[in-house]
Amino acid sequence: MIDLTGLKEIFGGEMLVEAKDVTRYGVDQIGDDHYRQNPAAVVFPTETSQIAQLMKWANRTGTPVTPRGGGSGLAGAAIPVAGGVVCSFKKMNRIIEIDTENLMVTVEPGVVTNTLDKELMAHGLFFAGYPMSEDICYIGGNVAENAGGGRAIKYGTTATYVLGAEIVSPTGEVLHFGGKRLKDVTGYNMLQLIVGSEGTLGLFTQLVIRVIPRPGARGVLLAAFPEIRQATQYVAALRRVSSEVPSSIEFIDGETARSTNVSMREGDRQTLSPETQAYLLVEFDGPDTDAVDRLLQAAAVLVGENGGAADTMGTQESTMEAAWKLRKQVPWWVKRNAGSCHSLEDVVVPPAAVPELVMFADHLRSSYKVPIAVFGHAGDGNFHLTPMKAPEMSQEAWEHMIPDLLSELYGEVVRLGGTISGEHGIGRKRVSSLSVALSDAERASMIAIKRALDPRNVLNPGVIFSESEVMAE
């Protein structure tokens, strides 16, 4: 057990030390409880100086520290080393400034993404680099993972909007990179190196985020296709011929959509055909409803030309909310249906390879005799193929089978020119699979950076790379 005296001097009573209080910080939304590792303590800093002192203490004592936002991650990056310390950003949740002249906001990392969006709405602005879990995730976590989400096809990922940051290094120095400027080539681009590093290279304490004018109108089209091949062909056709880039193109296989729909409250359910094999949710935004309506009508014509039918279409808030609710409920249905016996994947391929990837899921279903939910961001090639334990399969058989299935999936994704994570990260979940996507030399270059910035390997050890890789001579 670690000596907590130093922490008590830094944080006073703002610390949890009893096992019954720290257990909720031992896992994130990964779903598989065997990853659970309870920390010895959880600290709740309110200012940068406390975090700097924490990291200096960690280096003196050799105690691992794991940064944690909203705990909504799906790869285990916020799961601590057993007996270490979790640094929760729950209390660093101020929106420091909304700068409408520069179109930038300065925030602390514990701001919930949806909270920021509501504040920006009053100014006619929005943060475009949002993830799908915007009502529970923190801005700091979005930046640490370089979160993507449904709008990435048009607006890009979180990194596109991060212009500056105050960062505490793994050794306890307070660093400032970037700022309220749109150009900066003063030395290495350290800011973008640390963005997306999953809490392994630094702890964000303040962030400068670029925001943009909020579109005047949005509209959705929920399209049904009798064959999966038709849906994937439609995505390719829409990307080629649309006069405007859709703000989202989301895919759900028919069986998953129907199962999710049945699990929802009666008033929230859609009318879904048992014959449909694939659904696409297409969203456009624009200056006004007339412009968006024209885009939706053109997209609906293209649906028909590709063998599908437009089930739902419109710019009304209720129409959009109902369509998005179906899509957003899919991962929650998976969790309720499969419990810990599922593996929510995050593979990404070049957009033109989407048909091959989606059809490969059929091969995996047949070969391994398990159901696989197929959903995700069809517009940018980022799919959440999610194998689930078959009802008749034993727990032992599932645990024996899933590594082989994932190995085959990852190998095919890389063959198609893709990689094993598009937005969820490597975390702890995919450490052993990183060699599938990166060469020895590529991994070595990254490990060299980790060693240089975190020589004692105290900041989020075991995330992205195993502890033995980082500490090897």
Image: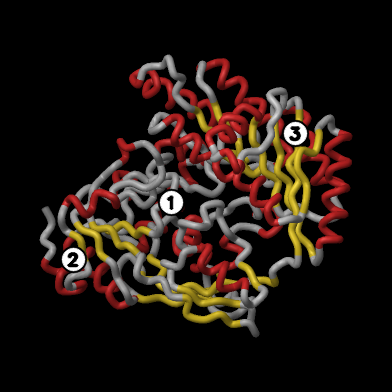
Q: Which residue is mark 1?
A: 72
Check if mark 1's residue and mark 3's residue have beta carbons within 8 Å. Answer: no
The type of colouring in the image is secondary structure
Label 3 packing within 10 angstroms: few (<14), some (14-19), many (20+): many
Q: Secondary structure at mark 2?
A: helix
Q: Which mark is residue 194?
A: none
Which mark is first along the chain, 3 or 1?
1
Give the CA distance from mark 2 to mark 3: 59 Å
Q: Which residue is mark 3?
A: 224
Q: Label 2 sits on what residue type? A: Arg
Q: Which residue is mark 2?
A: 60
- The one nearer the camera, 344 or 278, is 278
Task: Give the number of the mark in front: 2 or 3.
Answer: 3
Q: Secondary structure at mark 1?
A: loop
Left or right of 51 in this view: 257: right
Q: Label 3 sits on what residue type? A: Ala
Label 1 packing within 10 angstroms: few (<14), some (14-19), many (20+): many
**Residue depicted at x 64% and y 31%:** 253
- The one nearer the camera, 380 or 371, is 371
